[in-house]
Image (spheres, rainbow, N blue to C red):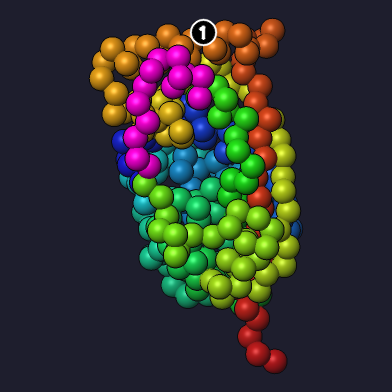
Amino acid sequence: MIDWNRAADGYARSFAVMCAGAAPALLDAVGPVPAGGRLLDVGTGTGTVAGAAAARGWAATGSDGAESMLAIARREHQGVEFELGDVLALPNADDSFDAIVGNFSVNHTADPRRAVAELVRVAKPGAPIAFTTWGRPSALVPLWQRVIDESGAARVPVDRILAELDFQRSEAGLLALLADGGAEPVEVVEIEWEFAIAPEGLWAAAPAGVAVVGPIYRAADESTRAAMRTAYDRAASELVAEDDLLHVASSAWLAFGRAPRTAS
């Protein structure tokens, strides 16, 4: 698994920009803000979704297991409450929040069903629960593949969720994940967006250990790292637009459900 404490700065410069594109759809899914509405953003990372929720009028709390992520979130989104918390064992009381969201956090846990069960536990009865996870392969995969191939970097084993705890990245798989975690499944939709990023910012993912290329870069020797950077600069220079940015089409699954309502 990624060491998010070590990855925070590089993630903030690279994939946080990509993940931010899903924030509007995620917040649209949970609907309008009720009077005094409290929202929890689990796995908040650099705080993008929690900050956007606060801008919409939510009393937002962002929770993350990495202190270095929270330091960035607190700096970037002053006035929003941020707390240290593992999505598999949230520090919050039962029935605490009017809405729960998670932007690419449930899929980064060792036990996604247990994570969903925690979201359900801290949600008020009937509260909306929405989270995103990656679906189709990223449009960045060919770029990273070219970097690996041209540099001769060796692939390394990647830590993955145990097969018996994993879930299918599909509409049916996500509906089942919601139900298995104790939520009332409502719908799963695919969302799409485009993000733009400077090549230097995207490259920050590699030394941070993030994405396909990160673990390979971290395991490589200095000469291979230099070759990877040379290959990346060459490939990125061929892809940048007139504004000197990379424009990347992205997509994800958005799963939406509700905490069980109290019996009538």
Q: How many marks?
A: 1
Residue sitting at x 29%, y 23%: 220
Looking at the rendering, the stretch of residues picked out in magenta corresponds to 145-158
Q: Residues within 10 Å of mark 1 (few under 14, many from 20)?
A: few
On the image, which quarter does residue 255 sit in?
Answer: bottom right
Query: In the rendered image, which residue does mark 1 sit on?
Result: 234
Tell me, yes or no, whether the highlighted magenta stretch contains residue 151: yes
The quadrant of the rendering that contains the C terminus is bottom right
Camera sees residue 248: yes
On the image, which quarter does residue 51 sit in?
Answer: top right
Residue sitting at x 57%, y 25%: 142
Tell me, yes or no, whether the highlighted magenta stretch contains residue 102: no
Please say if 118 is above or below 5.
below
User: What x and y, as percent, mark residue 189?
Assistant: 73, 53
Camera sees residue 60: no
Please say if 117 is above or below 69.
below
User: Which of 138/56 is in front?
Assistant: 138
Residue sitting at x 55%, y 13%: 236
Q: Amino acid at mark 1?
A: Arg
User: What x and y, as percent, mark residue 181?
Assistant: 54, 71
Residue 80 falls left or right of residue 240: left
**Secondary structure under badge 1?**
helix
Residue 261 falls left or right of residue 9: right
Q: Residue furthest left?
A: 221
User: What x and y, as percent, mark residue 66?
Assistant: 35, 46
On the image, which quarter does residue 89 sit in?
Answer: bottom left
User: What x and y, as percent, mark residue 86?
Assistant: 38, 58
Residue sitting at x 63%, y 13%: 239
Q: Residue furthest bottom?
A: 264
